[in-house]
């Protein structure tokens, strides 16, 4: 049963914010506007739920009345309205769950080849293209930050910024080890190989989100290198930034401008430092929820793409889809992500009820 006092509190807060904004209050205007907008769908859900409760109560009164004709009319509608109550209640429960403050952010996606040599690099390239296509289907913008390609057209490492509303909310569960099982093109005997690639998804952050002191950075510049060791250009435009307190290092050499490479490297470094803080902050919660959708630890094997059998299995939720080609094309990836989000919400609801 929903706590009515909590629902009343949300409605009062929404009214207070609305009154303050209508009065033209300039104090904390941006902050209040954001909170008001966030409460709008919650309030709509509460009002719909309470309206349904009132309808049920009115119909129950008619059913208990002496007018036989009215009673017969009300009985069918009462059954229908009562059946709708659990879904309305769950919608409010989900709306009231604490929000991940980073869900609405854009994201930085890093894909790296793991064990498996050339085949792992080819798989990493496939995953990178999968996220590019998935982003395009959602109308998000993709900016390639860094690409390190292998000799056979695979990908040693690829980093991209995916920009749009709610990107991190949908992509954050992709962090982890992705495994592929298939016969490589270079395999003459037809033997199935198993290879892996790691994916890291981090919320994109701004300077105001995480402060980096200049004294904590070592910045080295060097000449950009292309495939086969050939010089991309003849100036020291490549940048390597090392964050001394943590040892985190970012290398950026895709741009011809040293300034642009430094800006891109700082963007990735901020995201990695912020992700470290997120992981430390959420470690206890992640441990509690590991059985649901996993901790998000990129060392954890999360999914297997088996091409000979045409299936994709997400090991965190035991979901198997027999449409590997559509998933890798980005077309069916939502079918996995939607279930992951639902499982995450179920885990949060269970934790709220147990608290």
Image: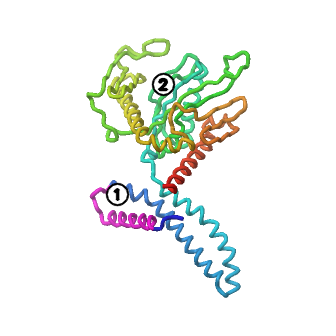
Which residue sits at x=71%, y=33%? Answer: 310
Q: Predominant secondary structure in magenta?
A: helix
Which residue sits at x=33%, y=63%? Answer: 21
**On the image, which quarter does residue 221 sit in?**
top left
Is 332 magenta? The answer is no
Give the mark, 1 or 2, whose residue is nearer the N terminus. 1
Q: CA distance from mark 1 to mark 2?
A: 41 Å
Mark 1, residues whose alpha carbon is within 10 Å: few (<14), some, or many (≥20)? some
In the picture, measured across the screen, residue 75 lies left or right of residue 301, that is right
In the picture shown, does residue 77 fall above or below 299?
below
**On the image, which quarter does residue 187 sit in?**
top right
Marking on residue 32? 1
In the image, the segment drawn in magenta is 5-29
In the picture shown, does residue 327 fall above or below 78?
above
Is 14 magenta? The answer is yes
Q: Nearer the viewer, mark 1 or mark 2?
A: 1
Q: Position of residue 214 (x, y in %)?
A: 27, 29
The color scheme shown is rainbow
């Amino acid at each position: 049963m929903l706590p009515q006092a909590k629902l009343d509190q949300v409605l009062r807060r929404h009214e207070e914010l609305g009154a303050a904004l209508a009065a033209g209050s300039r104090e904390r205007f941006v902050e209040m506007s954001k909170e008001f907008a966030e409460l709008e769908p919650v309030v709509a859900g509460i009002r719909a739920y309470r309206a349904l409760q009132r309808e049920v109560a009115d119909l129950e009164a008619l059913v208990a009345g002496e007018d036989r004709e009215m009673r017969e009319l009300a009985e069918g509608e009462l059954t229908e309205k009562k059946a709708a109550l659990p879904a309305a209640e769950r919608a409010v429960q989900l709306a009231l769950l604490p929000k991940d403050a980073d869900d609405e952010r854009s994201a930085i996606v890093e894909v790296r080849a793991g064990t498996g040599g050339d085949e792992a690099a080819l798989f990493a390239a496939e995953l990178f293209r999968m996220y590019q296509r998935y982003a395009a289907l959602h109308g998000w913008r993709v900016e390639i930050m860094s690409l390190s390609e292998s000799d056979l057209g695979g990908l040693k490492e690829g980093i991209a910024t995916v920009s749009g509303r709610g990107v991190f909310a949908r992509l954050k569960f992709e962090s982890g080890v992705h495994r592929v099982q298939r016969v490589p093109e270079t395999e003459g005997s037809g033997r199935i190989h198993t290879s892996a690639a790691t994916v890291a998804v981090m919320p994109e952050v701004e300077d105001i989100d995480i402060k980096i002191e200049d004294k904590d950075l070592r910045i080295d510049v060097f000449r950009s290198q292309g495939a086969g060791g050939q010089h991309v250009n003849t100036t020291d435009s490549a940048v390597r930034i090392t964050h001394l307190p943590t040892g985190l290092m970012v290398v950026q050499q895709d741009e011809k401008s040293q300034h642009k490479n430094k800006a891109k490297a700082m963007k990735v470094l901020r995201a990695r430092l912020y992700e470290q803080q997120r992981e430390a902050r959420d470690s206890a919660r992640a441990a509690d929820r590991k059985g649901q959708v996993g901790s998000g630890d990129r060392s954890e094997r999360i999914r297997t793409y088996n091409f000979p059998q045409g299936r994709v299995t997400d090991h965190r939720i035991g979901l198997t889809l027999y449409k590997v080609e559509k998933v890798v094309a980005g077309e069916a990836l939502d079918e996995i992500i939607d279930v992951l989000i639902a499982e995450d919400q179920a885990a949060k609801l269970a934790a709220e009820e147990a608290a």
